[in-house]
């Protein structure tokens, strides 16, 4: 074998060992991590958390009981029809749809007085069934809980079976007429739970999410699953600490956060050292996020001894060159 061929062979072997293998990646493209810190903020507006007592509205489908104070013989039970009307004794057909309870009571009292049957009757209406008499609880627990006027959040959750071990303590309330959901954190502190025990009203929908997990892969001392806390957000640095920290071969500038929303998967590339030293925000993680920290090839070769093989080949190369020169 001549000198050029020998040198080419040794160089090719050294290059092959030094070059990490790679495969085509058909998944999503790498994106920046600007949106990772977004999460539903807790509601702080006291007008939303503790609204003034309100007069419920009657609506189609409500089953109501009409009573007159001191008149036990008058207590018809009727349901508001799809046209918003009801048929009441001594009154006839009357429209109650979208009237508040107070307005409906005043209207019925006026009609009874007009009919000459009662003088200044004190009318009360009780909603016993229908969309205006219950709160719906969905998510990790679910049920339909009767509510007259208003009830406290913890009472309604207890009526639906209570929070489970996998239930998030961050509760979302969707209220008709409000553009934004109401988000409260019950936490685990009784004092904090009391502050978050806000009133809920008929027609509200309470969403109880499920606490999730974070999957940790790659160059961490402890790979596996990290459960999300039910009452506080979990950040990348906190998961890193719970996983024992990165190992020596870790490639800090190539950490990946893989997040799936619906059928869309996003891969976000971060420089972990920038996060560690406060030069980049510490991302808030979501349920089912996958954290992957790849190895640095150079560090790996130093760890597993492959670097010694490369150095040996280089030594052989220099010995060959020296031998060739000495033969000239």
Image (cartoon, rainbow, N blue to C red):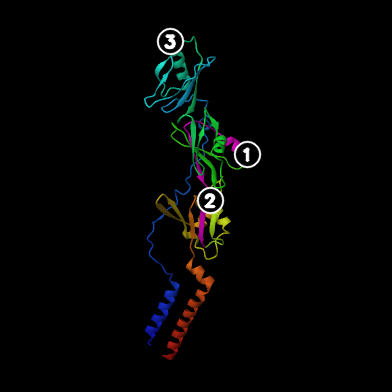
How far apart are labels 2 and 3 at the CA level? 68 Å
Give the percent coordinates (x, y) of residue 105: 47, 18
Residue 114 is tagged as 3
The question of residue 46 being in magenta is answered with no
Relative to 145, is 109 above or below? Answer: above
Q: Range of the magenta residues?
A: 191-218
The residue most toward the right is 190
Front-lying residue, 98 or 108: 108
Distance, label 1 to label 2, CA atoms, is 25 Å
Q: Is residue 53 above or below residue 68?
A: below
Residue 294 in the image, given as x and y percentages of width and height:
48, 63
Residue at image position (54%, 35%) is 156
Q: CA distance from mark 1 to mark 3?
A: 54 Å
Residue 322 x, y percent position in the rendering: 46, 86
The crowd level at tag 2 (other Cα within 10 Å; few <14, some 14-19, many 20+) is some
Helix, strand or loop at mark 2: strand
Q: Name above or below for residue 100 compared with residue 297.
A: above
Check residue 15 in the rendering and tell me which mark sits there, or answer none: none
State yes or no: discs 1 and 2 in contact (Cβ < 8 Å).
no
Crowding around mark 3 (Cα neighbors within 10 Å: few <14, some 14 to 19, many 20+) is few
Tag 2 residue: 235
The secondary structure type at the circle numbered 1 is: helix
203 left or right of 246? left
Question: Where is 157 relative to 241, above or below?
Answer: above
194 within the magenta span:
yes
Numbered mark located on residue 190 in the image: 1
Nearer mark to the viewer, of 1 and 3: 3
């Amino acid at each position: 074998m001549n000198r050029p061929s020998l040198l080419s062979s040794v160089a090719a072997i050294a290059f092959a060992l030094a070059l990490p293998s790679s495969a085509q990646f058909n998944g999503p493209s790498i994106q920046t991590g600007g949106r990772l810190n977004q999460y539903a903020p807790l509601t702080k507006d006291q007008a939303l958390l503790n609204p003034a007592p309100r007069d419920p509205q009657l609506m189609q489908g409500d089953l109501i009981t009409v009573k007159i104070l001191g008149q036990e013989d008058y207590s018809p039970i009727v349901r508001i029809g799809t046209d918003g009307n009801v048929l009441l004794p001594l009154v006839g057909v009357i429209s109650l749809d979208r009237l508040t309870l107070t307005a409906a009571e005043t209207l019925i009292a006026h009609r009874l007085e007009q009919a000459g049957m009662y003088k200044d009757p004190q009318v009360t209406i009780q909603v016993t069934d229908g969309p205006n008499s219950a709160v719906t609880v969905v998510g990790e627990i679910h049920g339909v809980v009767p509510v007259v006027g208003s009830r406290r959040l913890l009472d309604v959750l207890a009526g639906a079976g209570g929070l489970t071990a996998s239930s998030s303590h961050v509760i979302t309330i969707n209220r008709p007429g409000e553009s934004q959901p109401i988000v409260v954190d019950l936490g685990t502190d009784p004092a904090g739970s009391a502050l978050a025990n806000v009133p809920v009203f008929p027609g509200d929908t309470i969403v109880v999410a499920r606490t999730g997990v974070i999957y940790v892969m790659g160059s961490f001392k402890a790979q596996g699953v990290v459960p999300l806390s039910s009452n506080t957000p979990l950040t990348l640095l906190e998961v890193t600490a719970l996983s024992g920290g990165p190992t020596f071969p870790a490639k800090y500038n190539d950490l990946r956060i893989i997040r799936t929303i619906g059928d869309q998967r996003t891969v976000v590339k971060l420089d972990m050292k920038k996060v560690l030293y406060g030069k980049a925000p510490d991302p808030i993680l979501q349920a089912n996020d996958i954290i992957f920290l790849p190895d640095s090839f150079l560090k790996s070769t130093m760890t597993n001894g492959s670097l010694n093989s490369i150095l040996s080949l280089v030594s052989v190369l220099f010995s060959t060159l020296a031998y060739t020169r000495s033969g000239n």
